[in-house]
Amino acid sequence: METPADPFYRQLPKVELHAHLNGSVSSETMEQLIARKPQLNIEHSMTAIRSGQRRTLDECFQVFKVIHQLVDSEEDILMVAKAVIQEFAADGVKYLELRSTPREETKTGLSKRRYVETVIEAIHQCKQEGVDIDVRFLVAIDRRNGTKVAMETVKLAEDFMLSSNGVVVGLDLSGDPTVGHGRDLLPALQKARNCGLKLALHLSEIPSQKEESELLLDLPPDRIGHGTFLHPEVGGSDTLVDKVCKQKIPIELCLTSNVTGQTVPSYDQHHFKYWYTRGHPCVLCTDDKGVFCTDLSQEYQLAASTFRLSQEDVWDLSQQAIHCSFAPEPVKQQLEQKWAKLRPVCLMSDTDEPSTPPLFYMDVPSRPALTSVLEKENG
Ligand code: 6MZ
């Protein structure tokens, strides 16, 4: 991460709902992992994509393979998960849903069950150490592994949903979108839904997934990851948009990740604009803060500067994310209270005479005005 976000964005209380554990490893932690395993001859440049650089999505997936070589034991997972949680907390994230694909590694004796237990252990340790963040976990299905593994993963997630005291709340479907078809995973996803796991599914991350998205939207998912090619302006369809809108399925949007991975040509063409101006629930997320050298504060600042959002707009976005989370209702209420308490600290009303200079000030249109600006731009 080159330049930290402005104080307003760092102080803003935030909710992170789309963060892949191994993609979120910071450069500091990566240095430690590399030092622990010199025999792998891995250099830091192989585990992160600096800001401003562009890669194909395929190249991004190569990076995860390198990171997986560095994170292959219980000890590594515990270290990485604790560090990631602490870093999100330091960035002002008050509620975090981490997701990760359980892996087994014969070399280190790691099993998928121990993998999940270790992430849960990291979450417990952070809580005991007083880190100011509520963390939940989504067990991830890597789409390339097919039907059988998906079914096993659902079983694992279900077991932990019942035994983890509310830490495991759902299931993620992710992995290289060019590999496999969602049709083969439907039975597993249906089973997950029926047993009470929430579903956060990567959908239409690339243009060729229209048919798959139609199928998956009928489940329906509780949240959509990316949804880059759902809308008709980019080759999606009105049918897809209708399904998403009618069911008000929140969309997790990751600006830096999408532009770096070149599924979106530039920030101002990000589909955030399409959904946000329609008043659809949008949640800004990091995706892989380590790989894409970002943090959630920067993602908020990027959205604000690209789409000319006021502080109020930004505040509303972060507050709205509470209700898109899979947290139980009482936790959502506690988060609402936290936001209410922090609001006067972060936001200053226009009439307030600041005794100290405002942390951040931008004379920009509010949301209805933004809509008209964008409408004018779109002709
Ligand atoms: C789809 C992604 C992703 O599970 O080992 N992952 N899947 N699209 C993306 N957009 C860039 N970014 C990350 O974290 C790494 C794994 O998360 C998924 C991939 O399956 C990747 O291997 P974990 O913690």
Image: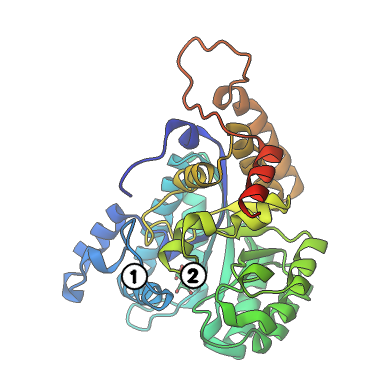
Q: Is residue 112 above or below residue 378?
A: below
Mark closer to the observer (1, 2) = 2
For this orientation, the residue located farthest to the front is 379
User: Is disc 2's CB within 8 Å of ligand 1?
Assistant: no
Query: In this view of the protein, which residue sits in the foreground, 132 or 366?
Result: 366
Residue density around tag 1, few if under 14, some if 14–19, many if 20 or more, within 10 Å: many
Q: Which residue is drawn at 60% across and 78% down?
A: 153
Q: Is mark 2 on a helix, strand or loop?
A: loop
Query: In this view of the protein, which residue sits in the foreground, 305 or 256?
Result: 305
Residue density around tag 2, few if under 14, some if 14–19, many if 20 or more, within 10 Å: some
Question: How many numbered circles are shown?
Answer: 2
* Circle number at residue 263: 2
Query: In this view of the protein, which residue sits in the foreground, 89 or 158?
Result: 89
Residue 151 in the image, given as x and y percentages of width and height: 64, 84
Residue 42 in the image, given as x and y percentages of width and height: 21, 71
User: Is disc 1's CB within 8 Å of ligand 1?
Assistant: yes
Residue 82 in the image, given as x and y percentages of width and height: 42, 53
- Separation of marks 1 and 2 at Cα, in angstroms: 22 Å
Q: Which residue is drawn at 65% across and 89% down?
A: 184
Q: Residue 280: tell me if it is visible.
A: yes
Q: In which quarter of the image is the C terminus?
A: bottom right
Query: Mark 2 is on which residue type?
Result: Thr
In the picture, measured across the screen, residue 226 lies left or right of residue 110, that is right
Q: For residue 270, what is the image quadrant?
A: bottom right
Query: Mark 1 is on which residue type?
Result: Ile
Q: For residue 191, what is the image quadrant?
A: bottom right
Residue 338 in the image, given as x and y percentages of width and height: 64, 32
Q: Is mark 1 on a helix, strand or loop?
A: helix
* Circle number at residue 162: none
Q: Which comes sooner in the sequence, label 1 or label 2?
A: 1
Query: In this view of the protein, which residue sits in the foreground, 218 or 130?
Result: 218
* Circle number at residue 67: 1
